[in-house]
Image (cartoon, grey):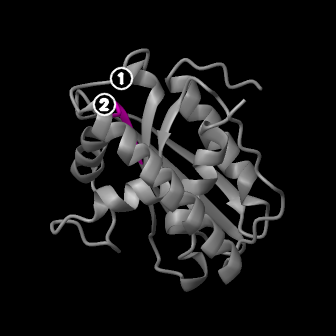
């Protein structure tokens, strides 16, 4: 239950405006629900029954070479990674509009790369205990490096850096699936299914 299935064929270059609109609408609904739950629960720590290692804020992906064809992955990468992480019911994931709402602070430039301190601060606001930042690095030819840095929020420390190299023309959902599996292993979640 609660599983989000990724559909095949995510284009490597650009996303149709209609799909972006649907993603934004879904993220907005999720943000309202999460914001209401956080408001009612308070911000004193993980909620009852929440394993701190199994709550995660997925930070924006940075387009390291500022390739316009990869700009959609700034938020699209967050959504793709969330699709795979949210397949496990015991993992709480903060993404989408909730992340955008948290990032609307004067000291954060909306288009800038999130630093370790930025993403840890956002995760503390969201009441989660693991945070990530990501980057997309186009290589020569048709390949991309997709990297995720995973942070322990309570200690403010880097737990791991995970990179997957894939063809830009490939189904990127598979690369994000691999990254999600590696993140879940850090949280001791059975990622085999």
Q: Nearer the viewer, residue 67 or 1?
A: 1
C-alpha distance separating marks 1 and 2: 7 Å
- Among numbered discs 1 and 2, the one appearing first in the sequence: 2
Task: Pick the residue in front: 189 or 5.
Answer: 5
Residue under numbered circle 1: 47
Q: In the rendered image of this protein, does residue 53 appear above or below residue 25?
A: above
Left or right of 153 on screen, residue 190: right
- Location of residue 3 in the rendering, given as x and y in whole percent from the top left corner: 71, 37
Query: Which quadrant of the figure contains the N terminus?
Result: top right
Query: Seen in the image, is 61 located left or right of residue 11?
Result: left
- Residue shown at 54% from the left, 17% from the top: 188
Mark 1 crowd level (few <14, some 14–19, many ≥20, 10 Å Cα):
some
- Element class at badge 1: loop
Quarter of the image where one finds residue 9: bottom right
Query: Seen from this angle, which residue lies furthest right?
Result: 8
* Residue drawn at point x = 72 percent, y = 59 percent: 172
Q: What residue would you read off at disc 2?
A: 41
Can residue 13 be seen?
A: no
| Cβ atoms at labels 1 and 2 below 8 Å apart | yes
Q: Is residue 176 visible?
A: yes
State which region is magenta: 127-132
Q: Is residue 150 above or below residue 171?
A: above
Measured from the top left, where is residue 23 in percent x and y? 61, 65
Corner quadrant of residue 7: bottom right
In the image, residue 161 lies at what x, y percent? 45, 41
- Nearer to us of marks 1 and 2 is 2
Residue 115 circle label: none
């Amino acid at each position: 239950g609660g599983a989000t299935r990724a559909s095949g064929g995510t284009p490597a270059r650009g996303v149709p405006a209609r799909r972006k609109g649907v993603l934004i609408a879904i993220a907005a609904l999720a943000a309202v629900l999460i914001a209401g739950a956080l408001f009612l629960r308070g911000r004193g720590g993980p909620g009852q029954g929440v394993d701190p290692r199994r709550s995660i804020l997925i930070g924006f992906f940075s387009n390291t070479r500022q390739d316009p064809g990869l700009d959609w992955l700034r938020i699209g990468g967050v959504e793709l990674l969330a699709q795979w992480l949210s397949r496990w019911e015991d993992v709480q994931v903060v993404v989408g509009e909730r992340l955008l709402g948290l990032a609307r602070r004067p000291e954060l430039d909306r288009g800038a790369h999130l630093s370790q301190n930025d993403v840890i601060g956002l995760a503390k606001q969201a009441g989660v205990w693991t945070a990530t930042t990501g980057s997309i690095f186009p290589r020569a030819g048709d390949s991309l490096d997709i990297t995720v840095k995973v942070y322990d929020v309570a200690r403010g420390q880097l737990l791991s850096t995970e990179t997957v190299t894939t063809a830009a023309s490939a189904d990127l959902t598979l690369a994000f699936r691999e990254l999600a599996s590696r993140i879940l292993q850090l949280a001791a979640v059975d990622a085999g299914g």
